[in-house]
Image: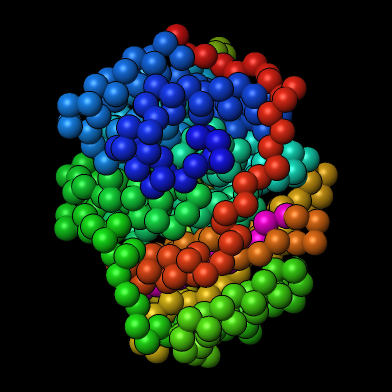
Amino acid sequence: MEICETPLIELRQMLDNGDVTAKEVVYSFYERIQHVQGQFRPFVHQMPIRELMIQADDADDWLRTGRAGVLTGIPIAVKSSIAVKDMPNDCSSAVLEGYLAPYDAEAVHNLRECGAIVMGLTDMDEFAMGNTCQTSVHGGAKNPWDFQRVSGGSSGGSASAVMSGCVAAALGSDTGGSIRQPAAFCNAVGFLPTYGNVSRFGNVAYGSSLEQIGPLTRTVKDAAFMLDAMTNPDSNDSTHHKWANEDFSLLAEGELDNLRVGWCPESFGNELDENIRQSLENTRTVFEKLGAEVVNIELPHLQHAVATYYVIAMSEASSNLSRFDGMRYGKRVSKDNLQATYKATRREGFGEEVRRRILMGTFALTESAFKDYYRKAAQVRELIRRDFMEAFDSCDVILAPVSPFLPPRPDEIPDDPLTSYLADMYTVPANLAGICAMSLPCGRTPSGLPIGMQLMAAPFREDFLLQCGVMYQDLTHWHKRPAPIKTSGLSGPIPIIS
């Protein structure tokens, strides 16, 4: 196994044992980026090699002198909506062209304090609005398992970067599945922490009441390791739970006796691909072999989740994105008067999907529509939350699909936005309910495409997810197979930030 395809936990042990140096590790990942960027395009901006080598030298010095943090010398990537000081923070949108982050997001700061080395910023759907990574102004990241297919969205670049061997782990954000769906498409582990468990400070908000920052990794144990470093209390985020700094690595090693797995196939619907359905059935059997009790549960209001989510998310997006007007930062299209400048800047700066969601959200918040749309959606959201809380009285985790379909090719993406929104039908409920959830590999199609499953647990019961995921990965092999990357002849240009 190459260094750049080694799970984070194993890399940590190799560095601690002196089997490799941080400089060797960083250069291995940097070299892989140069090989695959031209074809898979996971990155939109990369740290210059000279800066990376300086950080690697420092990491080696810390390792030699016993001052290393838990992530010293570990290469990571960051979604381009999450602030990294002095690097572009454009959210893959033209409207933030040229904008550099003035500070590190809290999650990035915490990871750097633990010694992580940021290799660069990854591509995403514009302002996290999409599930294919194709609404990006940069073109969108491709899938390491088949470069003709999408990597998922909105954190598609982060999932692609991890599974193409460009970094050991990456940060994404998840408003309605944006970590979990790309993880499923790319055979990664994608973790959505409980709302409030990770600080959102420094993340450019799409839907503030729904969104969380979380890790994408190769294994569940790697995800726990990343969460350990990310969850320090932060006074800058008023929604962050001040005590939310569990020892997730320790929790992941705990025993989970008398596991109860919730099962609600009625909520899967007819849209679910048969390959995915069969993999979920097989996964259910694996849990039964592990001694789990499979419990039938009911989630009666889940059928309304997509409609509820899009009313709330678009309304919050309309408010959050009103600040991007070309006056203080980013793109400006100057016209004869202020009103015309506003209109031209936002018309040319925002892509079609972002404009659509802003318009729909603005309508839902108007005086005439508020009662029938936003208020009603907030009420249904509470019913969905109660459904989950009642279900968790009888089970520890819920097993569900991540996506109704396998990663498509760009020409297979529906032109109809409403059809496209249904891709989020299995992931948005967790965000609406404010619970924690995780996507992890559970199968493969006959053609070799990865299949992911979703586990959900009650708020702040990340321990259930981690223990359950570790148990499953100890017994299965789906996460162990590397993507079929051919590094010869795949070099391509990559932006360098000087």
Asked where in the image residue 87 lies, by quadrant, the reply is: top left
Is 422 displayed left or right of 222 in the figure?
Answer: right
* Residue 218 drawn at (x, y percent): 50, 49
- Identify the residue shown where x is 75% and y is 62%: 445
Q: Which residues are magenta?
A: 449-459
- Which one is nearer the viewer's eye here, 392 or 135? 392
Asked if one can make out residue 464 in the rendered structure from this viewpoint, the answer is: yes
> At which x and y percent is residue 307?
58, 66
Quarter of image, res 69 = top left
The answer to whether residue 350 is above or below residue 274 is above
* Count of numbered tags: 0
- Image position of 390 with respect to 477: above or below: below
Q: Look at the image and say whether residue 453 sits in the magenta stretch.
A: yes
Expressed as whole percent of the image width and height from the top left, the position of residue 40 reads 67, 33
Q: Is residue 352 magenta?
A: no
Query: Vertical placement of 121 versus 260: above or below?
Result: above
| Picture residue at 28% right of the left edge, 50% below the top | 228
Tell me if 184 is positioned left or right of 372 in this view.
right
Residue at image location 38% in from the left, 33% down from the top: 19
In the picture, measured across the screen, residue 254 lies left or right of residue 355, that is left
Q: Quadrant of the C terminus?
A: top left
The residue sitting at 37% across, 87% down in the picture is: 258
Whole-percent x, y for residue 458 in the image: 36, 73
Q: Main SS type for the magenta part?
A: strand
Does residue 87 appear in this view? no
Quadrant for the N terminus in the image: top right
Front-lying residue, 295 or 329: 295
